[in-house]
Image (cartoon, rainbow, N blue to C red):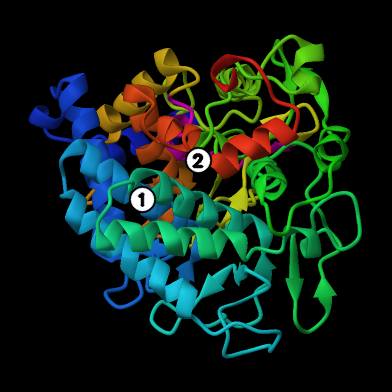
């Protein structure tokens, strides 16, 4: 038996420990379990005083404001699924929004949570103050605001709690100074440091930043200048990858995050009209290309097949000990595959397939179920799928296979929200009612479909 076959056998023995009852679960029972367990990540782990969500669990960590945004939307999914009551969700959302509204803000380097309506990428779970010297993040603030706007649309009843939620959501969104964050350029800056000002990088190309431009254009108080969307689309990279012509971006999260909140199916801007597609179709093609790359497996990693695939930003084995000679493994990084970007070290993230379920359910749902059936509780636990796994690792103690010990909030969110969008368009339909999202899409030049 050659070395590769030996590694594969060890990997199967290491991972395939699920019991018969797990393996025989029906589709519905598994996906119900996945949805409920993933919801529980957000419900269980929010800080009791601030509502802030951890970046990861069980490793003790700072709070990720993007994960908090996903958490806000997850509570609504919980109500829709019957896991919690509307009143429970309302109290949790109100607590979180009050924290951000009342948090310390200013240009100081420490002791504050945000500035100019934006918030720091990572903040202390309890105090909410800036973690170390991280940036004031435009994308993470944007994802937080998307969660806030979903709550504004959901809590539409005339009572004290729901009225206050809507008012706070308005106040927080209208305070974001998108025009300031343009940094006098035609594309939005990725962030700002009090120590040295704006980052050199801006939101260009095609990636998860699309929702920033929609919200920035839709703001009535501090809007991005007209023409920002055109400047954004001019930097797209259109190419053919594994037979799929689409706007390329390697990691799948870039094709998912904006789509968690906005239904792009059937609506088009000028760019997609000229290409004869919409952004939903673009994400479908990107997912198919990512899957086909994994099936072709040019680096010959262990375990890749038609149902075990998915490259996106996630944890990796690079920070843990392993004895593989002449192989370099990354820790957390943006794994992915596209015409101009390939980053693949054999690490699969279930959120890659989970976040793309609405685009290609015929491949994504079987992938999630197959990974669960093959590897059971090695990769599936209290809160659903652990963040990632790698079958090509040999540990220093001689065991084969690596599984992340953590769940990551920004990877849990796409699984939960996109499964619900696939079932009933729940979050998409909420955001169709939000005036700021609708206005932003129209100012960006979108028309057709549900925008008529």
Residue 39 in sight = yes
Circle 2 Cα neighbour tier, 10 Å, few/some/many (<14 / 14–19 / ≥20): some
List x then y, in percent, for residue 400: 39, 46
Which residue carries the number 2 mark? 434
Q: Is residue 184 magenta?
A: no
Numbered tag placed on residue 399 in the rendering: 1
Q: Is residue 57 left or right of residue 131?
A: left
Q: Work out how far the residue at label 1 is from the one at label 2, CA to CA, in angstroms.
A: 51 Å
Residue at horizontal 48%, vertical 46%? 393
Q: Nearer the viewer, residue 325 or 156?
A: 156
Q: Among all residues in the image, which is located at the extreme right? A: 185
Compared with 126, 405 (above or below) is: above
Which one is earlier in the sequence, the residue at label 1 or at label 2? 1
Q: Is residue 324 left or right of residue 19?
A: right
Q: Check if mark 1's residue and mark 2's residue have beta carbons within 8 Å.
A: no
Q: Nearer the viewer, residue 377 or 354?
A: 354
Q: Is residue 347 magenta?
A: yes
């Amino acid at each position: 038996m050659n070395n590769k076959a030996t590694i594969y056998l060890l990997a199967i023995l290491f991972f395939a420990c699920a019991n018969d009852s797990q393996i025989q679960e029906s589709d519905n029972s598994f996906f119900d379990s996945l949805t409920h367990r993933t919801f529980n990540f957000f419900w269980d782990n929010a800080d009791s005083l601030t509502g802030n969500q951890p970046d990861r669990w069980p490793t003790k960590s700072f709070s990720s404001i993007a994960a908090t945004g996903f958490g806000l939307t997850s509570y609504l999914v919980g109500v829709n699924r019957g896991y919690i009551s509307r009143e429970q969700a309302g109290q949790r959302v109100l607590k979180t929004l009050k924290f951000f509204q009342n948090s310390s803000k200013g240009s100081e380097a420490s002791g504050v949570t945000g500035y100019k309506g934006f918030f720091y990428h990572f903040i202390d779970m309890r105090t909410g103050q800036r973690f170390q010297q991280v940036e004031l993040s435009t994308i993470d603030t944007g994802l937080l605001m998307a969660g806030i706007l979903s709550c504004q649309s959901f809590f539409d009843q005339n009572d004290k709690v729901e009225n206050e939620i809507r008012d706070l959501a308005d106040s927080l969104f209208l305070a974001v100074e998108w025009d300031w964050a343009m940094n006098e350029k035609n594309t939005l800056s990725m962030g700002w440091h009090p120590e040295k000002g704006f980052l050199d990088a801006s939101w260009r190309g095609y990636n998860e930043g699309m929702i920033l431009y929609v919200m920035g254009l839709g703001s009535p108080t501090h809007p991005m200048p007209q023409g920002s969307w055109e400047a954004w689309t001019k930097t797209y990279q259109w190419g053919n990858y594994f037979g799929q012509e689409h706007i390329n971006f390697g990691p799948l999260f870039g094709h998912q995050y904006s789509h968690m909140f906005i239904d792009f199916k059937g609506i088009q801007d000028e760019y997609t009209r000229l290409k004869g597609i919409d952004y939903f179709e673009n994400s479908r093609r990107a997912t198919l290309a990512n899957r086909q790359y994994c099936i072709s497996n040019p680096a010959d990693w262990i375990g890749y097949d038609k149902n075990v695939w998915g490259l996106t930003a996630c944890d990796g084995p690079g920070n843990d000990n392993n004895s593989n000679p002449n192989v370099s493994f990354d820790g957390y990084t943006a794994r992915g595959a596209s015409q101009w970007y390939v980053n693949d070290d054999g690490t699969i993230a279930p959120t890659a397939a989970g976040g793309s379920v609405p685009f290609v359910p015929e491949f994504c749902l079987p992938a999630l179920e197959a990974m669960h059936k093959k590897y059971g509780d090695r990769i599936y636990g209290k809160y659903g799928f652990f963040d990632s796994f790698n079958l090509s690792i040999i540990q220093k103690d001689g065991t084969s296979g690596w599984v992340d010990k953590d769940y990551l909030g920004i990877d849990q969110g796409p699984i939960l929200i996109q499964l619900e969008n696939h079932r009933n368009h729940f979050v998409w339909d909420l955001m169709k009612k939000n005036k700021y999202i609708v206005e932003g899409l129209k100012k960006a030049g979108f028309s057709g479909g549900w925008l008529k």
